[in-house]
């Protein structure tokens, strides 16, 4: 376990216990920021290796850190913005508040009020920024490419180690099991395709919460009825999901809606080509040489975009190489961290709100 710095300059709150895209972002960014800053996470559901503050450590935030006029509280959810506001405005603690928005929809009045109280705002894409009514800085996500990388032992060997059929290539869909994530679109596309492509298997990885158990059950019934129960597998949620990317030859991101969406970037960093719906930043992140982009909620388009990769090994290899090249060039984690740190530095140096965000 890493020891939290005794005098953190930056606090990254995480108030959601279950793994999510936001939590994954925090898990990746905190160690990267720690190369250059004194930073600590705060909240439940975080791995032991992260530098973290406990509840008893919060009183440290009542005074400024050594060498800085204030600490930065970097929130990524509503539930994390509000405590920062209370600590800064009611208790008068020396904090400045940064919020990262990934949402691509009109914010509620309450969320707009919270965002308006921030000292700086970051949008994860220009599309996200279009929904903000305050000045902001666009910083796209990056990926920890020491963690997400092509498997050294080969994909067939990785499949064997994970209990998949090593003789069959694998196409995967990772994320929470629910309608919004398009899991049903992936399953239906696989049912259409795998009967004619005996050398492939489908892998669905992700958590199913109680309210979506019926949705998952219905998908498994459809798979059984198609006689594909041994070739379309639900493997559950895994914190070492990078190992599962290494078992894939193709990744599918069929979401009906997405704020940003890390999974295609993670797949590309593992050298896996991507077929994705045109949501989040997928169209900007996945060039034609690295995969295909299709309209959201269009099963026919999704199926036909996947089909060529299942019977053309040359296309698969070329797209995988292009995916890796794109990820290494455009989405390194260090680039994201340094651009965020530039926002912090502008706050610490007293730059105008127009260059960092705005507090209302």
Image: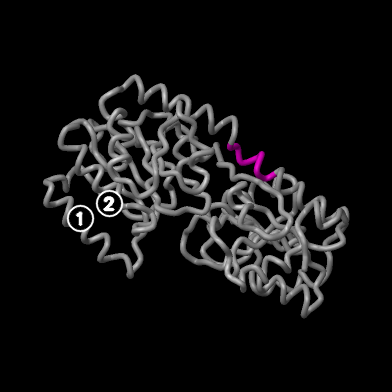
> Image check: 200 left or right of 240?
left
Q: Which image quarter: residue 44?
A: bottom right
Q: Which residue is mark 2?
A: 234
In the image, residue 148 above or below residue 39: above
Secondary structure found at label 1:
helix
State the extent of the magenta-drawn residues as a range.
331-337
In the image, residue 155 above or below residue 92: above
Tell me whether the residue at label 1 lies in contact with that at label 2, contact meaning CB atoms closer than 8 angstroms: yes
Lower position in the chain sequence, tag 1 or tag 2: 1
Q: Position of residue 68 (x, y in %)?
A: 86, 58
> Image check: 333 left or right of 199?
right
Q: Residues within 10 Å of mark 1 (few under 14, many from 20)?
A: some
How many tags in the picture? 2
Q: Residue at x 33, y 69 (%)?
A: 210
Q: Position of residue 191 (x, y in %)?
A: 20, 44
Q: Which residue is mark 1?
A: 220
* Secondary structure predominantly adopted by residues drawn in magenta: helix
Front residue of this view, candidates 26 and 2: 26
Q: Position of residue 329 (x, y in %)?
A: 59, 30
């Amino acid at each position: 376990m890493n020891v939290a710095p005794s005098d953190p300059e930056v606090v990254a709150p995480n108030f959601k216990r279950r793994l999510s895209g936001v939590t994954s972002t925090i898990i990746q960014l905190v160690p990267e920021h720690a190369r250059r800053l004194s930073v600590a996470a705060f909240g439940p559901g975080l791995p032991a290796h992260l530098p973290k503050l406990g509840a008893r450590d919060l009183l440290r935030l009542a005074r400024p850190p050594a060498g800085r006029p204030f600490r930065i509280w970097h929130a990524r959810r509503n539930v994390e913005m509000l405590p920062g506001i209370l600590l800064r405005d009611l208790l008068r603690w020396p904090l400045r508040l940064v919020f990262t928005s990934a949402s691509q929809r009109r914010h509620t009045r309450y969320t707009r009020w919270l965002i308006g109280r921030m000292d700086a705002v970051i949008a994860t894409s220009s599309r996200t920024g279009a929904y903000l009514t305050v000045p902001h800085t666009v910083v796209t996500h990056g990926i920890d490419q020491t963690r997400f990388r092509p498997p050294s032992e080969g994909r067939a060997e990785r499949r064997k180690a994970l209990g998949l059929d090593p003789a069959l290539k694998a196409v995967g869909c990772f994320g929470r099991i629910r309608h919004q994530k398009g899991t049903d679109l992936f399953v239906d596309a696989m049912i259409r395709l795998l009967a004619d492509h005996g050398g492939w298997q489908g892998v669905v990885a992700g958590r199913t919460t109680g309210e979506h158990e019926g949705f998952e059950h219905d998908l498994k019934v459809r798979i059984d009825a198609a006689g594909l129960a041994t070739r379309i597998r639900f493997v559950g949620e895994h914190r070492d999901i990078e190992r599962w990317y290494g078992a894939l030859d193709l990744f599918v991101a069929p979401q009906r809606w997405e704020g940003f969406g890390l999974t295609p970037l993670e797949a590309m960093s593992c050298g896996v080509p991507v077929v994705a719906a045109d949501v989040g930043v997928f169209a900007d992140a996945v060039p034609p040489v690295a995969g295909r982009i299709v309209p959201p909620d269009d099963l026919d388009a999704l199926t036909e975009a996947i089909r060529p990769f299942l019977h053309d090994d040359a296309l698969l290899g070329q797209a995988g190489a292009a995916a890796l090249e794109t990820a290494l060039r455009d989405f390194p984690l260090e680039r994201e961290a340094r651009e965020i740190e530039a926002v912090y530095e502008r706050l610490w140096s007293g730059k105008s709100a127009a260059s960092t965000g705005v507090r209302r």
